[in-house]
Image (cartoon, rainbow, N blue to C red):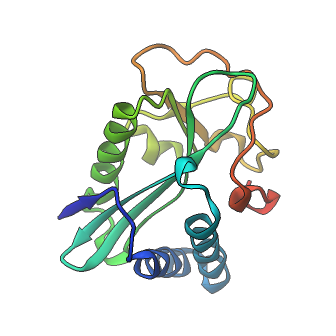
Amino acid sequence: MKFSNVIDGTERLVVDLFTATFAASEGAAEGAMIGGLVARQLAETPPDDIRVFTAWDGATPVGGAVFTRLACPDDPRAVVLLSPMAVATDRQGQGIGQTLLRHALAALRAERVDVAMTYGDPAFYGKVGFMPVSVSTVPPPHPLSQPEGWVGQSLTGKALPPLKGPCTCVAALDDPAFW
C-alpha cells in the first residue's frame, strides 16, 4: 500500500473510485453526485484550498480523502473540511480508511493546519480522533440534516475553542444537498 499527497494525472481514477464506492453503498444517483462533487473539487478549487490524499494498491486507487478549506474570515486559524472520503468497496474493513486518515492528518499538521472538520459517521471518524462538535463551536456553512455527524478535531494538541463564524466552504461543496 502506497499513500500519496499528489493527484496530478490520476484525477479520473480518483473520481471513478468515489463514484463506484458511493454507488455501491448508496445507489447510482448518489455515486454520480459524489463523483461529480470530486470532479468539481479537483477542477475548480484553487490549489491552496485543497489537499487530496490517496491510498494505492499498485496502479489502482483503493482510498481517497479530499480536504478543502473551511473559511472562517473572523478567525485566524487554518481549518479544513474532509468531504468526501471513500475506500473501495472490496477493500473496506481492512484499516485502509483509518491509515489513510492518519497519514492525511499528519501531513496537515505538518502544514500547520489548526482544525480538521468532517460531516459523517462519528463512530468511524472517532477512531482517528474526531469528536462531536456543536454548531455553535464550529458553524457549518449550511444547516445540517444530521447534526450528530458534525465532528472535528484540533490538530495543534490544544483544545478546540469556538471558531468565529460564519464559516464558508469551497464552491463545489456550497450546496445544501451535501449538508
Q: Image point 40% across, 38% down: which residue?
A: 108
Q: Is residue 131 left or right of residue 9?
A: right
Query: The N terminus lies in which quarter of the figure?
Result: bottom left
Whether 15 is drawn above or below 113: the answer is below
Spot occupied by residue 68 in the image (x, y as percentages of width and height): 57, 49
User: Residue 162 placed where, x, y %?
Assistant: 67, 18
Indicate whether 114 appears above or below 7: above
Seen at 33% across and 67% down, the residue is 92
At a point 31% along the width and 53% down the height, the residue shown is 100
Question: In which quadrant of the rendered view does residue 168 lie?
Answer: top right
The furthest residue to the bottom: 28
- Residue displayed at 53% across by 74% down: 22
The percent coordinates of residue 99 (x first, y second) are 27, 50
89, 66: nearer the viewer = 66
Q: Is residue 9 left or right of residue 161?
A: left
* Position above or below: 156 against 113: above
Number of numbered discs on residues: 0
Q: Position of residue 130 (x, y in %)?
A: 47, 35
Residue 30 sits above or below residue 66 on the image = below
Q: Is residue 78 left or right of residue 71?
A: left
